[in-house]
Image (spheres, helix red, strand yellow):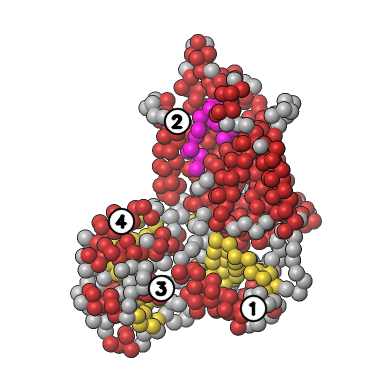
Amino acid sequence: MKKLLSVILAVTLAAGLLSGCGKKEGNITIGIGQFAEHPSLDNCRKGFLEGLAEEGYKEGENLTVSYENAQTDGGNATQIATNFVSKKVDLICAIATPMAQSAYGTAKGTDIPVIYTAISDPVIAELAKEDGMPVGNVTGTSDKLPVKEQLEMIREILPDAKIIGILYTTSEANSISTIATYKELAPTYGFEIIESGIATAADIPLAADNLINKVDCISNLTDNTVVNSLPTILNKANEKNIPVFGSEVEQVKNGCLAAYGIDYYDLGIQTGKMAAQVLKGEKKASEMKFETIAEASFYGNTEVAQKLGITLPDDLVKDAREMFDTIADMVK
Amino acid sequence: MLTILIGVLEQGLIYAILAMGVYVTYKILDFPDLSVDGTFPLGGAVTAQLIIAGVNPVLTLLISFLCGALAGIVTGLIHVKLKVRDLLSGIIVMTALWSINLRIAGANVPIFSKESIFENKPLDRIVPAGFRPYLVLTILLIIVIIMKIVLDLYLKTKSGYLLRAVGDNDTLVTSLAKDKGAVKIVGLAIANAFVALSGCIYVQDAGFFEISTGTGAIVIGLASVIIGTNIFKKLTFVKATTAVIVGSIIYKACVALAIAAGLATTDMKLITAVLFLVILVISGDRKRRVKKNA
């Protein structure tokens, strides 16, 4: 038994060694590392591939894509980055902050460019300088939330609301910086922010119960853990008739009342086009400023509005990027 | 191929220091110390904060070493003085450290633009460009060898012998009129100091601190210890510390091969578990087997 196992182990490892060495000539290979698995980041990735395809890099034709997900584990992120660098991919696409930092840190000594997306603040993450220029062979797009527009929207939909509740994970840097922005801007629109920090998804039911009793509405961030537990929050909020605002399209589709947010698919496309410029050799990643999506748009869900007894204002609906009249199956 | 090799050696050496710490608790003290999952990022959190404050990167090695020792002492005190079971003491400290690490550093602290033990002005001046790719590896090798010698020397002191005695036969220690509790606390302090030092070096190499990197550190440590000590079981002239360092490198090599073979990172933990099991079975390092042999 022992000998058999030793042989199996040896053969598996040897097979691994051989299979790791296949790379076709004339073909572009990219590695996509994604930090967590949830709809916004998935949309980012799909958009990225679409952006590349529009520029002539089609997966399966002249483009080989290897995709890895770190499942919110920093150790995995480093492993993924190291793997891409050892495979000498032509470009690394890193989705979300810790993944981008791992990729940049690992690829630093090589000539592999890193294109990132879905990073709230590339300057704070030390991937870009104050003027937006990269710190190295690394650039991409930011998904900074349009907090000001979101607050304006909430004020318009709920003229009498005073307190906005926000759930966030204390270990997610993006959330912490966005909450600071919320707190800074809230008084201008006559709001007070009550935030409730959680450590793991298991804390959400209690934290949500507590928060819902203190606030007039809830506004979501792009917090990975909270977004993954959206159904729990929505169910609890619906029982008390508390509106929940999302931060992007997928959350509205899944049962949030409305959001003034960006479309991650579009963000991905924009990122994919930047990557294509680098792959074609038109520009170097180290010479490109990071980009943001210029305009955020309104998304609303009429079924949710009906249930809450709220009418979404016409001037918002008229300019909506997309309106939903049902709640997706995720929550029912 | 060379890049893969250098990557494996670098990662292996960084975790070798952690593995030496785990060796002290798991093999010598026979104490399953889970506080490691908290002390590894503790070393990183302290380092990131100190480097941002402008502290010399070399000094951070010492400070995180001491912070780790402090955390180890806490685990020891909980176990010895409050009489909490070994496994639970570790879990309590690990859980507490999650919050403490967030308080110290926050969730994500980049230090790309700061000097580190791998990238600083004095090094830039002396190291020729051609040697750059091997620089990190060389520095790591020096640190690992120093730490190995320090641990070897310590284990030969009186205190070191007592440590071994507590793990093998603690009534002997009591009969020598020594406090076995105090010896355990010393052991835990040393082990966690090594682990925190490993976290410190990890952060300086990665260029940023991220709270989630500690998850599973204990598994990597245990796997390295078990692989290393079993491979060299029959070669008695190889010191256990050397075996553990090699074990860590082999473990990282297996992970790299598993990924190169096209296994998804999502399955990483499963692969680790299977690898772990296979090694245990091959080496016969199981309870049942031990009893049968005895």
User: Disc 4 designates what residue?
Assistant: A205
Residue A240: image location, x then y, percent: 21, 65
Q: From which residue to which does the magenta span run?
A: B21-37
Which image quadrant is residue A114 in? bottom right
Disc 2 and disc 4: Cα gap in Å? 31 Å
Q: Disc 1 or 4, which lies upstream in sequence? A: 1
User: Disc 3 designates what residue?
Assistant: A250
Which residue type carries mark 2?
Asp
User: Disc 2 designates what residue?
Assistant: B86
Q: Secondary structure at mark 2?
A: helix
Residue A127 in view, yes or no:
no
Q: Is residue A102 left or right of residue B178?
A: right
Tell which tag, 2 or 1, sits nearer the viewer. Answer: 1
Asked if badges 2 and 3 are on one and the same chain, I answer no
Q: Quarter holding the C terminus of chain A?
A: bottom left
| Label 4 CA crowd tier, 10 Å (few <14, some 14–19, many 20+) | some
